[in-house]
Each structure stands twice: as C-alpha cells, then as structure tokens.
Image (cartoon, helix red, strand yellow):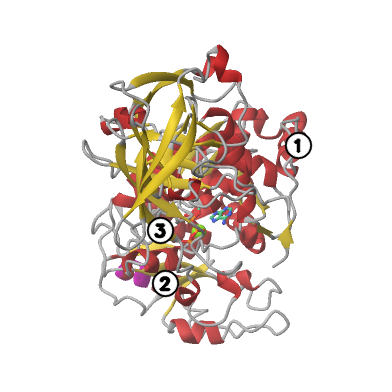
C-alpha cells in the first residue's frame, strides 16, 4: 500500500471534503426535505480503534456541521461474537471523544420488522430457502466473468419456502443447514447480486439483547439499508469496501420504498437513504483488525484492550492522546476515494503540537545520582516556577531547592572535558532548572567505582527570577529536591510493531512485534506531582487525564494504575519530531 505524505500545516480553514460537497448539493436541491441524519453503526464485537474514529468524525461531523442528527446504531446481528461489554465501552469511548449522539438504536430492535420483510420477499417470489452447505453455495457463485450456477432449491414453491423459513426460526433446523437467499440474478457481473444470503441460523449463542427469541439472524446486506430506512437516515456513510455492496443496498430498498412503500419508515414515499463511501484509515506500525487485536489481548502480548500501545481509543487515551489531537489528525488526513497508509509519525506530531501548548513542564530524573550542595545550610526553600516558561497565564507551581537533590547521572562527568557543558569538578557553572547556579567540586564512589554522590557549591545570589538570576550559563540541568521528591514508575512506550505494515508481511504477525515497545524506569519526580496521588478529576462525568512534559524526556500522562502511594506515568511521545524529516 502506498504511504501518503501529509504535510501538517497551520490551522487554516480546510476546503470541503467530497462528502460535504454531496451533502451541500443535496441541501441545495432539497433532497429528503433538507433533513440531515447520519448514523455511526459499530458492531459490538470489539473495542473502537482509530480507524473507527475516522468514521465517527465523519458521521458526527456532518450532523454537527449541517444541523442534523447522528444516531448510534449497534449493528448487533451476530450473537456469536457480540456482547454488552462492547456496547458499554463503545458508548464510553465516543463520549470521551466529545461527540453527542441523538438516539441509541440497535439493529436487533428491527428483528421483527426484518423478519416480516423477509416473509414479504418470500411471498413475492423474491427469496428462497437453500439447503446447500456454505461451501456448495460458494462454489456455485462463479467468477466476475463467468456466471454462477443456480441452486437446485432456487425454484422451490413459495408455500414450501414459507414453511421452511418458519421452521428455521422455530429452532428446528441445525445451524448451517439452511439459509434464506434473495432470488436475484446468478449471472450478474456484480457478485453480490448472485442470490445473496439474507438470513442464517444461529442457535449456539443467545443474543445479548433478545436472548433466545430468534433463531434466524439477518445478514449485513439485508439489515443495514433497511435499518437506515426505518430510522430515517439520509446519508449512510461507510468505508470503500462497501462500494460494491451499494447496488444491493439500493436493490433491497427498491423493494420496500417508493411505489412499494409499506409504511416502515416515519417519512413519506419520496424519502430515500443513500450510501456513500470514503477511504479507510490504515496507520503504519500497527494492526487494526479486530481478530488480530483480540489475539494480542488474549495471549497477553499486550496488557489489555487499553494497553497504551494499542490503536484502540481506550489505548490512545491511556497513552495520553487527547480527543482534540485525534480530531485534528482526522482533519489533516481528510477523506478521499483512494486507499492509503498514514505514517504513525503524523499522529505523534499532532499530539506533540497539542501538548506543547498545554502540558505543564516538570522535572523528572530517570537515572538518578545524588547531588549535595556543600555550602547550603538551610532547611530547603520553595521556588515558584512557571508551568510553561514564558507563559505566566498558564500558572505556576512550587518547586523545591535544598541541600540534596537528584540529578541525572549523565549530567556529571568526573574528568573535565571542554566539549561537556554540564557538571565537572572545577568545570563550568551550570544552572539548576528554575533555581540557582551551581559548580561541581568532586564526587564519591562505591567499591565498584560507581559514582554515588556528586558535590557542588551554589551561588546564593543567582536565583532565577532575581537580579542575579539573569546570569547566563552554557547549560541548564534538572534537579529534584530529595526530601520532597516522589518516586514514580515511568513506562516508556514505543511503537507496537517493528515493521511499517505488519499486515503485508508473510508469516505470523506476532513475530513482528517490537521487542522494545515498553521499558519501565523508576524515576524521581518533583513533589509538585503529589496531587496526582489523589482521586482523578472528573468533568462532565468523564475522568480527565493529566498531561505533563517531563523536561528533556518527553510528554507523559498519569496512568490509572496510580494509587495513593504510587505514581505511574506513561510516555505519550518523545520531544523530538522526526515527522517532516
Ligand atoms: P468488522 O471486521 O468486525 O466488520 P469493522 O472494523 O468494520 O470490523 P464495524 O464495527 O463494523 O467494524 O465498523 C463500524 C464503522 O466503522 C463502519 O462504518 C466502518 O466502515 C467504520 N470503520 C471500521 N474500520 C475503519 C477504518 N479503518 N477506517 C475508517 N472507518 C472504519
Ligand atoms: Mg464491519
């Protein structure tokens, strides 16, 4: 698959996408009385991923922009794979993204109407019960250039079809032994017209909403368009793989709308839903197939659906992505009719740009060594530091300075080196972030020669924010005062897969996982993060994530594993942006 190059630009107005153009034309022509109604139709058989969000932004976006409504419809026609757990997480994820649906519908709300419709099809001689196996039916389908072979059951009398279909529904026929097929055209160049299956038997699993009421379940093609019609959907927007299904979508609607109108929709005989398709989202270094994601979860290759490396909405949330950044990403990639692959670097670029403006900056030391200020005799002091340098309006926080601080091991070098601008005994002066200028005097080592303590003196007249604070140094280093420091478990996440397009490679996709996608470090962080150990902040019933820039380390978010005595931070992304390189 071709990789698309998307150049991130400023926030200038974008031009209308092709679906918006269609909607504006429909509005101008008064189609469907100028009503705009969309739906987002997830199957509750897994968690939402970033690909779904592309569809969500389209469906809800069109409704928001053109004063319409977008409903949520659970496409729950396969009880073998679906569950209430998924319904709940899908609702929660959409709410977190900030979208508001009108109604919540379920395809299962229409099981009776769809069944009645199927009976009408049978009575009109437009459907028949086939007793062949799935394999036999597939073999008879033909190819796009060769016509298919008619089933021996194709011309069965209407009465017999009716009786058999009712027997199927009563649960008297074994799964897989019979299906109801539309009688259309076994030679049609569009394979979807070669007597598509309308209904199949599922008796092995109860339905998560209708229990054991039904033993026959409608197939996607027979359920989707009709559900749209029952609800009054005007623009039924989906992904490109459904383009070849569109004639069938229209065919089924032709049978029940217009002249054959049978009162199954709240709108008049001129009302008609239309299907439109856009390109799917594919992102590098990840997989989005529900089957593969489920496998990663079940086999413990990730910590769950919300593992911060997963492309799921709950995973992105836990990784520290914001709804705004995800929506900006969708705006940048846009909607077309051409399938492509989006660089994960764009996603990282967008969240970095978002957090740059908002995330408070704090000190954290990942590889700590103790620094002792030999000429400081106080009991410690408070330093007021701006959350984001130069942005007083974004607030300040209290940092500490004292006799002992944690610094990065790499910020000290025992031998003076002219190219090393940080601490060396007798070397340069260095500023401690937001506080004083210090100068190293020496160090202490353990029996193995590892440095255990660094010694330095400080200049009491050099405090940042005072007159002496203007004195420049070649380098600034981070320090975290020991008495107030907080221990944090920091999870350094990287891309889940080691290759760009794991789905395109031969062999087992699990062999392509990035072995370094998670590293855990025990860090010392500023005591100002202590407030994170309290209960999370809830706004509009939704728990809010707290984001930070750990200076020199990257952007981080507070993980829900955080407890009253343990802070856990996840790396969202590094500071460096390679996207445009
Ligand atoms: P399944 O393989 O189980 O059908 P699905 O990914 O199609 O999975 P659905 O729950 O049926 O999942 O999808 C709901 C909606 O999200 C559909 O309209 C579908 O077109 C859209 N969608 C799914 N994946 C993507 C994607 N990668 N990019 C854009 N839209 C997507
Ligand atoms: Mg689907």
Mark 2 = which residue? 161
The local crowd at label 3, few if under 14, some if 14 to 19, many if 20 or more residues have their Cα within 10 Å, is few
**Which callout, 3 or 1, points to the residue nearer the camera?**
3
- Image-based side of 173 in relation to 255, left or right: left
Dominant secondary structure (helix, strand or loop) of the stretch shown in magenta: helix
Q: Earlier in the sequence, mark 1 or mark 2?
A: 1
The local crowd at label 1, few if under 14, some if 14 to 19, many if 20 or more residues have their Cα within 10 Å, is few
Query: Which disc number belongs to residue 16?
Result: 1
**Which callout, 1 or 2, points to the residue nearer the camera?**
1
* Residue 66 location (% of width, % of height): 65, 28
**Which callout, 3 or 2, points to the residue nearer the camera?**
3
Is residue 166 magenta-colored?
A: yes
- Give above or below for 284 relative to 7: below
- Give above or below for 438 relative to 468: below
- Real-space CA distance between mark 3 and mark 2, rounded to the nearest whole angstrom: 62 Å
- Real-space CA distance between mark 3 and mark 1, rounded to the nearest whole angstrom: 43 Å
Is residue 90 magenta-colored?
A: no
- Real-space CA distance between mark 1 and mark 2, rounded to the nearest whole angstrom: 49 Å
- Image-based side of 126 in relation to 274, left or right: left
Between 68 and 110, the residue placed more toward the observer is 68
Residue range of the region highlighted in magenta in the rendering: 162-167
Between 87 and 232, the residue placed more toward the observer is 87
In what element is the residue under mark 3?
Answer: strand
* Residue 147 location (% of width, % of height): 68, 83
The answer to whether the beta carbon of the residue marked 1 is less than 8 Å from any atom of ligand 1 is: no
Between 340 and 510, the residue placed more toward the observer is 510
At x 60% / y 19%, what residue is drawn? 470
Mark 3 = which residue? 519
Q: Image quadrant of residue 45?
A: bottom left
At x 46% / y 61%, what residue is drawn? 517
């Amino acid at each position: 698959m071709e990789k698309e190059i998307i150049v991130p630009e400023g926030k200038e107005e974008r031009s209308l996408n092709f679906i918006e153009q269609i909607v504006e034309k429909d509005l101008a022509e008064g189609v469907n009385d100028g009503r705009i109604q969309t739906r987002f139709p997830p199957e509750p058989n897994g968690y939402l991923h970033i690909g779904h969000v592309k569809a969500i932004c389209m469906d809800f976006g069109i409704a928001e922009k053109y004063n319409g409504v977008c409903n949520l419809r659970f496409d729950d026609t396969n009880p073998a794979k679906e569950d209430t757990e998924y319904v709940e997480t899908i609702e929660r994820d959409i709410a977190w993204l900030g979208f508001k649906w009108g109604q919540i519908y379920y395809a299962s709300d229409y099981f009776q109407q769809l069944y009645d419709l199927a009976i009408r099809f049978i009575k009109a001689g437009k459907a028949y019960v086939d007793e062949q196996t799935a394999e036999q039916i597939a073999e008879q389908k033909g190819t796009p250039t060769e016509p298919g072979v008619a089933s021996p059951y194709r011309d069965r009398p209407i009465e017999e079809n009716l009786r058999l279909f009712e027997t199927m529904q009563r649960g008297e026929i074994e799964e897989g032994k019979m299906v109801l097929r539309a009688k259309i055209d076994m030679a049609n160049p569009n394979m979807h017209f070669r007597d598509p299956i309308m209904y199949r038997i599922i008796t092995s699993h109860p339905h998560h909403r209708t229990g054991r009421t039904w033993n026959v379940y409608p197939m996607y093609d027979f359920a989707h368009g009709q559900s749209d019609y029952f609800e009054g959907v005007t623009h039924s927007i989906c992904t490109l793989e459904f383009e070849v299904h569109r004639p069938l979508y229209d065919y089924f609607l032709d049978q029940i709308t217009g002249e054959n109108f049978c009162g199954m929709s709240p709108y008049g005989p001129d009302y008609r839903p239309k299907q439109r398709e856009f390109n799917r989202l594919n992102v590098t270094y990840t997989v989005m197939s529900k089957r593969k994601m489920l496998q990663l979860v079940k086999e413990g290759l990730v910590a769950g659906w919300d593992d911060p490396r997963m492309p799921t909405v709950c995973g992105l949330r836990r990784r520290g992505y914001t709804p705004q950044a995800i929506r900006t990403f969708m705006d940048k990639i846009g909607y077309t009719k051409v399938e492509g692959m989006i660089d994960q670097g764009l996603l990282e670029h967008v969240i970095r740009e978002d957090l740059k403006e908002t995330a408070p900056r704090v000190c954290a030391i990942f590889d700590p060594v103790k620094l002792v200020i030999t000429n400081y005799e106080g009991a410690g002091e408070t330093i007021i530091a701006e959350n984001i340098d130069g942005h007083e309006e974004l607030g300040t926080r209290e940092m500490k300075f004292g006799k002992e601080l944690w610094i990065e091991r790499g910020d000290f070098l025992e031998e003076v080196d002219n190219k090393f601008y940080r601490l060396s005994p007798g070397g340069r002066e260095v500023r401690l972030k937001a506080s004083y200028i210090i100068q190293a005097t020496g160090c202490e080592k353990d029996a193995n020669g590892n440095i255990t303590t660094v010694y330095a003196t400080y200049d009491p007249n050099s405090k940042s924010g005072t007159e002496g604070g203007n004195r420049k140094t070649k380098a600034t280093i981070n320090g975290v005062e020991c008495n107030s420091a907080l221990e944090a478990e920091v999870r350094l996440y990287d891309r889940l897969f080691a290759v760009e397009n794991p789905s395109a490679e031969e062999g087992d996709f699990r062999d392509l996982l990035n072995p370094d996608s998670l590293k855990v470090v025990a860090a010392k962080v500023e005591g100002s993060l202590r407030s994170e150990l309290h209960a999370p902040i809830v706004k509009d019933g939704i728990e809010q994530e707290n984001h930070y820039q750990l200076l020199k380390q990257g952007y981080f978010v507070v993980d829900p594993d955080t407890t009253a005595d343990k802070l856990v931070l996840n790396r969202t992304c590094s500071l460096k942006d390679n996207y445009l390189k």
